[in-house]
Image: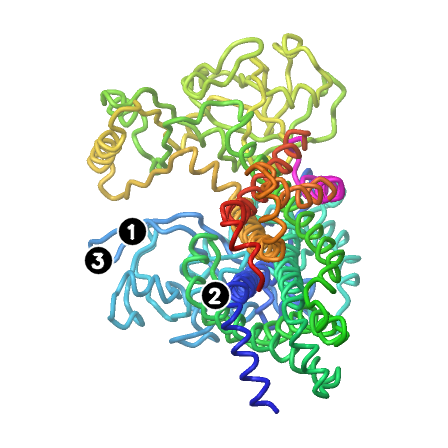
Amino acid sequence: MLKNYLIIACRNIWRNLGYVSLNVMGLTLSIASCLVIFLITKNELSYDSYHRKADRTYRVTMNALDFNPSVSMAVTTALRTDFPELEEVSQVWYQPEGIVKIGDTRYVEKGYSFADQAFLRTFDHQWLAGDPKTALSAPGSIVLTESIARKYFGKEDPMGQVMEVDGEKGLRVTGLIKDLPGNTHFPFTFLISCETIAKDLAGVKHFYQIMNANTYIVLPEHYDIAKLNSRLPAFIAKNWGNDIAKEAKLVMQPLKEIHFDQRYLISITPTTSRNTYRALAVVALLIIITACINFVNLATAQAIKRAKEVGVRKALGANRSQLIRQFLGETSFLVLLAVIIGCLAAYLVLPNAAQWLDVKISAAQLFQPGVIGLLLAITALIILSAGLYPAFVQSSFRPVDSLKSGVAAISGRGLTLRKGLVFVQFTISQVLIVGTLVVAAQMDYFKNRDLGFNKEAVISFGIPENAKKDVLRDQLRGNPGVKEISLSSGAPSYNSNYASFTCPERGITKDDVTEIKSVDEHFMDMFAIRLLAGEKIRKNNPEDTTRYIVVNETLIHKLGIHRPEEAVGMYIRAAGRQCMIQGVVQDFQSESKHKDRRPCILRYTPQGFFTASVKLQPSDMHSTISHIESEWSSLFPESVFRYEFLDDHIASLYKQEQKVYTAFRLFSSLAILIGCLGLYGLVAFAALQRRKEVGIRKVMGASLANILALFAKEFFVLIVIAFVVAAPVAYFIMRSWLENYAYQVSIGGGIFIVAIAVSFIIAAVTIAHQSLKAAFANPLKSLRVD
């Protein structure tokens, strides 16, 4: 019996190879897409979960005027003394960039840290060499990641090798670990023992000496975090006084929440909302639903062609359960074929997809138990959802009706269901189209609109400490490819310095927070920052007791002033200094649009000039940059020239959103493509069913337009009905997504017009081929009796 079923299945597949290919292709694409999406969402939603103590690990953060992920290293020392019950208290001092010297070769590396021995006990790393119990216990110890060790020492054994980092000489490699996974909030290239800088850290006593340092604690098992939180105010008061205890508090941030918590000022890695990746998982579900709809539609359509076969088999004694097993078996065979091809496709495309989507996932992860379990569940789901109904439909045909006139007797059966499923497909497609358009509009808004300054053709690079800044500026100005140059603490979109401010003159005695930028007199002109009132930044006399500043609109609004002219000449106290407002500028974007714009102060303080920003002439920028590098090397032979285009930096602020947009665009397109495959198959079958009708219409004088309208009208009606349902659903979903951002695009009617227009175009293109094929067919062949 099994052999008979297999022979019949193979004959049926060969006889309907076109429809079978469409079904298998749709399922293959959906399975491959779902596997890739699953790995992406699993990677993104499981940040830091791979640490064994993740559920008991917290980052100690500060909430005073704002949320700050860093605390003073004095807090770490006091925690160890006052909370001896804590399993671990670890401190790590992150360095965004450093110069590494191996022999005579220098490298610029991003993201290394000074860490204590407790850090290695708090977090789990895969050790390749060295002892994790002692690797960072001695001064001058350094632990490298595998790729960095290979970069510095090639195939040599890195253990015991000596290197220099940012002037710290004689650092000896005491450990080697595997590269960190992509889903960590704290990436680093290497770790240097905190004992190396013990003298510097010993001087950190004040609560607000933060220095970009992070502190982590591990609670004992079954220890209630609420118990610790209740003791923290008294802990602050005991060590730093009641005044600080009143204005600041320590917040214990769960390790697994760090990547998703967007409240904090500065993050080493971009934070994101969990809902973003949950939405991507929903796209995967919609892809599977679309593929199942295709299968059911084409299978029920094919059932009509097999009506006589069913009638004959029933007449010869086959019962309904046998027919159901046969047809369900054929479905299982096709689904398993699609699963095998889909897995192979995912395995082949995953490396390129990971690179394109900028996530650290590998093809090897497809063999993890969780992925295999998901695959088995998807396979079972597709077989049951896509196979049961067609099997019951095919087995339910009455022999008399089937044998009397075959297709004519039962062609209406299942038509309502197929229309309903096509309606669902169009609804899904339009929701995805609207979603993709909204995400694209928000990405465009992030990158290009309302920045408040000119970012074109500007590069920024750091200035070495104690550098001759005036000499550098004069030499760069002599380059004909340099249009303008400004020295500052950072270009407009860079921010790192925050301070409190008050204005007793306006009755504001409680501290508020402001960003402070040290800039020279050329900063505003070079970046085209608009002056609203007063004067631009100018050089200050070092002997002046009053500091002259320029502030943004947001700051004067905090003072209760709405006319910029009224703020000029007013005094505020910022960063412990009396400051007079000499000018007001239009707000500009100094950080990402995830958050509201903050108050900002521009001041002339040469000791804070750590960055040079150069506006290049548009012609031959590559040659100009090479010339700048040459001049740099002659001035600072011990440093490595490293620059960044300002627009690239701005784009990096939205790295997470760019990944999401790329993924949405890719997988939404695949979902729509899968829907098109099903629609194409349905139109092809409809053309086959109605070939005699088309032949009669042509003989009676029907035009090409009439034939096209015959096939298109029912689908276009379904598009309109689907749009009525999809529009409010898409609006609600995307409105909720946009609420994650302080600055948002509006979801206008134009987006919905584009969505329905795209749906019509997709349907028209999909329908056109088979419709034209039917329209141009010879009517004599169409009318010939089968």
The disc, 1 or 2, on the residue closer to the chain's N-terminal end is 1
Q: Are marks 3 and 1 in contact (CB under 8 Å)?
A: no
The disc, 3 or 2, on the residue closer to the chain's N-terminal end is 3
Q: CA distance from mark 3 to mark 2?
A: 44 Å
The quarter of the picture where the N terminus appears is bottom right
Closer to viewer: mark 3 or mark 2: 2
As rendered, which of 60 and 523 lies closer to the eye?
Answer: 523
The image shows residue 501 at horizontal and vertical percentages of 65, 27
The image shows residue 517 at horizontal and vertical percentages of 51, 28
Q: CA distance from mark 3 to mark 1?
A: 11 Å
Q: CA distance from mark 1 to mark 2?
A: 37 Å
Closer to viewer: mark 1 or mark 2: 2
The image shows residue 779 at horizontal and vertical percentages of 53, 49
Q: Quick check: is 88 in the magenta stretch?
A: no
The quarter of the picture where the C terminus appears is bottom right
How many numbered marks appear? 3
Q: Which mark is residue 346?
A: 2
Q: Is residue 76 visible?
A: no
At x 69%, y 31%, the residue is: 512
The part of the chain drawn in magenta is 722-746
Secondary structure of residue under mark 2: helix
Label 3 belongs to which residue? 103
Label 1 belongs to which residue? 107
At x 73%, y 76%, the residue is: 395
Within-10-Å neighbours for mark 1: few <14, some 14–19, many 20+? some
